[in-house]
């Protein structure tokens, strides 16, 4: 069981069954779902299956609900594709309450997840895939030190056209290891 992660503006806590409806609603909101890799509208069956998967003993996803200081849910986030052998994971963030965008909450959520990944899980590398039309996320990840590594050219089909996907990463130790 994960403990609550305390931040200045937000906290991260374990996802509960009571959160599933609001997560579904956030994910199905225009302005949010087009920035997710799963480009389908979700129902409660999808949410219950997802909840079961993230709570399996050997799940490769560690998910949190982001709350404000009044303990009200404002988003969902986590580390996905966690690879314990190679000490790697990808990061996922949805700030579901759109009226809160642009207030630094996404930055703090990202910082808390990175710290959790590196300090608690012992990860070496955290990656992110960002669609080329999501410039707000590109700026956020660059601001927090993520390095642009690659472009997967025209690998995403959305709204009748192909888009590039940008790959970013952050290493726990910026010093490069020499290979022998």
Image: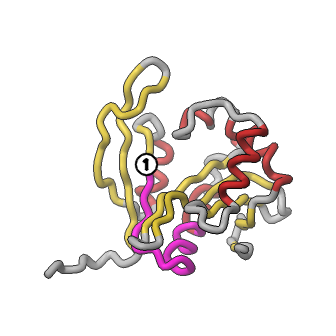
Quadrant that contains the N terminus: bottom right
Q: Would you name the residue on which mark 1 appears?
A: 129
In the image, taking residue 9 as reference, residue 38 lies left or right, namely left
Asked if residue 61 can be seen in this view, the reply is yes
Q: Residue at x 31, y 41 (%)?
A: 152
Above or below, comparing residue 8 to residue 169 in the picture: below
Magenta region includes residue 146 = no
Question: What range is drawn magenta here?
Answer: 112-128
Q: Position of residue 87 (x, y in %)?
A: 43, 72
Q: Residues within 10 Å of mark 1 (few under 14, many from 20)?
A: many
Q: Position of residue 170 (x, y in %)?
A: 39, 65
Q: Position of residue 22 (x, y in %)?
A: 79, 44
Q: Residue at x 45, y 56 (%)?
A: 141
In the image, taking residue 18 as reference, residue 43 lies left or right, namely left
Q: Which of these two is toward me, 130 or 41?
A: 41
In the image, taking residue 75 as reference, residue 87 lies left or right, namely left
In the image, taking residue 46 as reference, residue 149 lies left or right, namely left
Number of marks:
1
Asked if residue 99 can be seen in this view, the reply is no
Identity of the residue furthest to the front in this view: 57
Residue 169 found in image quarter: bottom left
Quadrant that contains the C terminus: bottom left
Above or below, comparing residue 90 to residue 180 in the picture: above
Q: Position of residue 109 (x, y in %)?
A: 62, 62
Q: Residue at x 59, y 60 (%)?
A: 61
Q: How is the image coloured?
A: secondary structure
Magenta region includes residue 124 = yes
What secondary structure is marked by label 1?
A: strand
Q: Which of these two is toward me, 139 or 121?
A: 121
Above or below, comparing residue 134 to residue 89 in the picture: above
């Amino acid at each position: 069981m994960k403990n609550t992660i305390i931040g200045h503006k937000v906290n991260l806590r374990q996802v509960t069954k009571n959160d599933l409806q609001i997560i579904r609603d956030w994910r199905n909101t225009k302005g949010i779902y087009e920035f997710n890799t799963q480009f389908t509208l979700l129902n409660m069956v999808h949410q219950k299956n997802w909840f079961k998967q993230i709570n399996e003993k050997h799940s490769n996803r560690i998910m949190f609900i982001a709350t404000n200081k009044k303990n009200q849910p404002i988003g969902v986030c986590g580390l996905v594709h966690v690879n314990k052998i190679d000490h790697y994971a990808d990061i996922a963030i949805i700030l579901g309450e759109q009226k809160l965008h642009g207030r630094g909450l996404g930055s703090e959520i990202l910082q808390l997840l990175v710290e959790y990944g590196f300090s608690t899980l012992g990860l070496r590398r955290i990656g992110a895939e960002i669609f080329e039309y999501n410039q707000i996320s590109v700026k956020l990840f660059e601001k927090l030190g993520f390095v642009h590594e690659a472009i997967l050219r025209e690998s995403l089909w959305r709204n009748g056209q192909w888009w590039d996907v940008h790959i970013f990463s952050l290493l726990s130790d910026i010093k490069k290891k020499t290979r022998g």
